Amino acid sequence: MEELTGTAAAAARFDVGSGVAEALLRQVARLLEALARDPGFADVIDLRSLPMHDADRASLRERLGNGEIDASFDLVGKTRITETACAGVWWVRHANSDDCAVLEQIVVARVPALLLAHPADIEGAARRLATELGAPTHRETIHD
């Protein structure tokens, strides 16, 4: 059998699997066009709910590529959010305490909602810092 090199080898890697990766890439392209038209647009593709083979997942991951941002945090298990090479397309993986994926998503948005600070957390941080600095909080200055 002839050995594949270069572009032929890359194309062969993408052909392995059920074809779900190609369909998902087309869906991501449509969602990305919607985001380009409306910066407030956001949508999520739940990868765990789809009949994907490991080859599909690997092909999708490789074709989307890697971007510059890689964020992770622990909430019962590890959550990792990575930007793909396509601005506005994010790969999100939530794992349990045994590091088994329990949720895997493609998020199409300017910023995934998980990375946005919750308003109550911001308010608490503002109060704590104001207290530490001995300054009145915003609410105290409004009510005075």
Image (cartoon, rainbow, N blue to C red):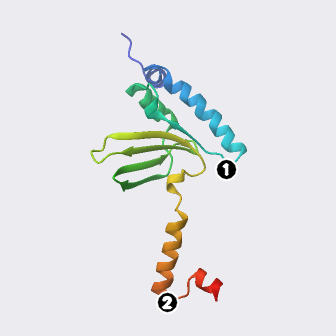
Residue positioned 36% across, 9% down in the render: 1
**Amino acid bearing label 2:** Gly
Write down the residue under mark 1. Answer: 40
Label 1 neighbour load within 10 Å: few <14, some 14-19, many 20+: few
Task: Count every numbered label the image shows and give the total.
Answer: 2
Single out the residue that lies furthest toward the top: 1
Instruction: Provide residue 68's location: percent of width, then percent of height.
Output: 50, 50
Q: Residue, x 47% and y 24% (percent of image)? A: 14
Q: Residue at x 55, y 65 (%)?
A: 119
Q: Which residue is mark 2?
A: 134
Residue 91 image position (x, y, % from top left): 48, 42
Q: Is residue 125 left or right of residue 28?
A: left
Residue name at image x 46 percent, y 28 percent: 50
Identified by mark 1, the residue type is Gly
In the rendered image, the vertical position of residue 20 relative to residue 111, given as above or below? above
Q: Secondary structure at mark 1?
A: loop
**Disc 1 from disc 2: Cα separation:** 38 Å
Could you tell which of marks 1 and 2 lies nearer the N-terminus? 1
Classify the position of the C terminus by image quarter.
Answer: bottom right
